[in-house]
């Protein structure tokens, strides 16, 4: 889970994991001696991260830190083309369907896992069956819910035993071909297959899934080396990789940091090669500090404040109250002053650059209007206890904007608002998973695939894994189901735009702003780092200068 910054959505925002034309920053950032010297193809890089929430299993990561590592270790069937969102095959030779319900997947032969085992159709089918099974407690198991037979391996009733360990919709045809039958049509199903949850697993995984999560064996451009918990994860280039994104460096150290300032100080001292986000304290000076090593890149993510509808305070709340709180947030002033112009106010539920993005779908609720805000809260019966909390992780610089949002709500409505910090992202996520959020929580969402359904159905569907706040909207669920039950992607995207409008009748979140990468790199890195549409560096493409 991780938008855009400038008011102008430029083409370089539409970049993806393997796009050769991905952009690396502002036009003014190019040149300046970044390419001076020769390249060391075995040189390694160190990048900022935090401790993943869960063991490194493809279906067990819903946050950016785990994904950052898993995406270097595993390759999926497809990715997406820069600028067009067109499907690009990776491990797949083809993914086809004539009716959006029955799909045939053919694999490129000869792919291997890091342990030498051949990647086959069975590797995918076994992975998906295991990951979907409720007994295996994978955090992203519902990603497989479209497949026929999912209910047999993942019964809806809590505590019920699965009827089977295999989904009837998966059939192996040969070593390099399998078929997928869905319960209903899903015209963008092939897009979903670029998400890490759909990665294959070797047979060694099933013998010891827990141990595998500590020492994963993938089929990607890097192989696992070591994991010192709460300190660092090391991966190294795998020479046997045959995919299109072969590593151009010798390996990566993912180093944990407890504060953004500490990471930035290490970057400036050349002890770190990439920083996840420039701390708020340096947003006005980082371009001067780093020169052509600074990066500002728009990407498809949105920052929201989500409501814990399961909590005693919110389970019977009137939507007018939530609308009022949203209208009390002065997004323009906060993005300009607190965030120093590095974000753009959000007025929709879908990030920019995604198929089906429509401006102002949030309508009046995302328009700053203090008087109307106060009126709606009063008409809706007020906030129980007249106090709200916004939960956030303190290991990145969220406190300044959380304080600013709270101050805006407090000043404009009289509702008391305070931040509820958790020490790190893992602790924040654990609290959400356990449904222990007091009232509201920071909810940033980064695309998994570039279709509006990912920001709608996958977050606000009543049974979606991404729906951590207990949001329920029958009209939205019905419209989303209708959007899935069509043959063409274009028609589905348009119908999801209609479903998005239903969210205003019961707000699942308070949209705040769209994201951009505000980052930098060390002097060791050759040329500008390129970024994907998800805002993550193309780690495989980073080259290291020869010493």
Image (cartoon, rainbow, N blue to C red):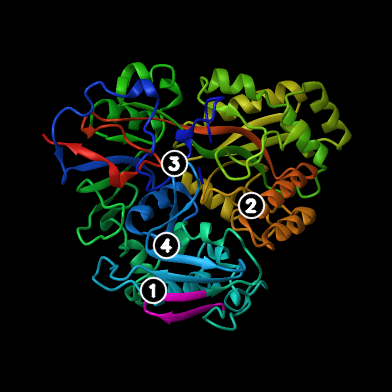
Using the numbered discs, state the Cα–Cα distance from disc 4 to disc 2 in whole angstroms: 22 Å
**Position above or below: 150 against 234:** below
Quarter where residue 371 is shown:
top right
Question: Which residue is tagged 4?
Answer: 77
Q: Kindly tell me whether residue 392 is visible in this rendering.
A: no
Disc 1 and disc 4 in contact, CB within 8 angstroms: no
Residue 490 is tagged as 2
Disc 2 and disc 3 in contact, CB within 8 angstroms: no
Q: Nearer the viewer, mark 2 or mark 3?
A: 2
Disc 2 and disc 1 in contact, CB within 8 angstroms: no
What residue is shown at x 68% (from left), y 54% (from top)?
A: 491
Question: Which residue is tagged 1?
Answer: 123
Q: Nearer the viewer, mark 2 or mark 1?
A: 2
Query: Is residue 173 on the magenta stretch?
Result: yes
Estimate the x, y position of residue 531 in percent, counting from the top left. 39, 39
Left or right relative to 32: residue 161: right
Q: Nearer the viewer, mark 1 or mark 3?
A: 3
Q: Earlier in the sequence, mark 1 or mark 4?
A: 4
Query: 222 or 361: which is nearer to us?
Result: 361
Using the numbered discs, state the Cα–Cα distance from disc 2 to disc 1 in whole angstroms: 32 Å
Q: Kindly tell me whether residue 328 is visible in this rendering.
A: yes
What secondary structure is marked by label 2? helix
Left or right relative to 447: residue 93: left
Question: Which residue is tagged 3?
Answer: 15
């Amino acid at each position: 889970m991780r938008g855009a910054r400038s008011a102008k959505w430029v083409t370089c925002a539409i970049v993806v994991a393997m796009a050769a034309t991905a952009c690396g920053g502002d036009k003014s950032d190019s040149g300046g001696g970044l390419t001076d010297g020769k390249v060391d193809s075995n040189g390694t890089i160190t990048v900022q991260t935090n401790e993943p929430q869960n063991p490194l299993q493809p279906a067990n990561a819903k946050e950016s830190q785990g994904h950052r590592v898993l995406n270097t270790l595993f390759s999926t069937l497809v990715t997406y083309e820069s600028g067009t969102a067109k499907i690009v095959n990776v491990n797949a030779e083809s993914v086809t369907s004539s009716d959006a319900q029955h799909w045939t997947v053919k694999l490129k032969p000869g792919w291997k896992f890091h342990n030498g085992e051949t990647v086959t159709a069975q590797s995918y089918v076994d992975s998906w069956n295991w990951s979907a099974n409720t007994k295996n407690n994978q955090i992203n198991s519902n990603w497989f819910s479209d497949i026929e037979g999912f209910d047999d391996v993942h019964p809806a009733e809590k505590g019920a035993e699965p009827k089977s360990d295999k989904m009837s919709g998966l059939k192996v045809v040969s070593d390099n071909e399998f078929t997928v039958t869905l319960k209903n049509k899903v015209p963008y199903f092939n897009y979903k297959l670029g998400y890490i949850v759909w990665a294959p697993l070797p047979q060694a995984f099933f013998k010891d899934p827990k141990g595998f999560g500590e020492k994963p064996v993938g089929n990607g451009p890097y192989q696992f080396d070591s994991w010192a918990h709460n300190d660092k994860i090391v991966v190294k280039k795998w020479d046997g990789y045959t995919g299109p994104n072969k590593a151009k460096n010798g390996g990566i150290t993912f180093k944990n940091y407890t504060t953004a300032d500490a990471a930035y100080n290490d970057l400036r001292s050349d002890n770190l090669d990439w920083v996840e986000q420039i701390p708020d304290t340096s947003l006005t000076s980082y371009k001067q500090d780093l020169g052509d090593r600074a990066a500002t890149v728009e990407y498809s993510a949105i920052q929201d404040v989500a409501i814990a509808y399961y909590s005693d305070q919110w389970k019977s709340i009137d939507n007018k109250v939530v609308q009022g709180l949203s209208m009390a947030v002065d997004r323009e002033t906060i993005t300009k002053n607190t965030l120093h112009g590095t974000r753009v106010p959000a007025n929709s539920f879908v990030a920019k650059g995604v198929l089906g993005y429509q401006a102002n779908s949030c309508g009046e609720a995302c328009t700053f209007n203090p008087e109307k805000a106060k009126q709606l809260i009063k008409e809706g019966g007020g906030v129980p206890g007249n106090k709200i909390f916004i939960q956030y992780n303190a290991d990145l610089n969220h406190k300044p904007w959380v304080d600013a949002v709270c101050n805006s709500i407090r000043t404009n409505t009289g509702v008391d608002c305070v931040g509820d910090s958790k020490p790190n992202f893992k602790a924040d996520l654990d609290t959400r998973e356990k449904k222990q959020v007091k009232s509201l929580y920071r909810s940033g969402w980064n695309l998994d695939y570039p279709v509006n359904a990912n920001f709608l159905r996958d977050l606000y569907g009543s049974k979606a894994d991404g729906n951590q706040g207990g949001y329920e909207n029958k009209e939205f669920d019905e419209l989303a189901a209708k959007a899935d039950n069509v043959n063409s992607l274009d028609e589905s995207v348009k119908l999801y735009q209609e479903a998005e409008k239903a969210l205003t009748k019961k707000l699942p979140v308070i949209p705040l702003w769209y994201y951009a990468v505000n980052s930098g790199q060390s002097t060791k890195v050759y040329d500008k780092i390129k970024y994907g549409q998800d805002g993550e560096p193309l780690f495989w493409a980073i080259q290291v200068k020869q010493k």
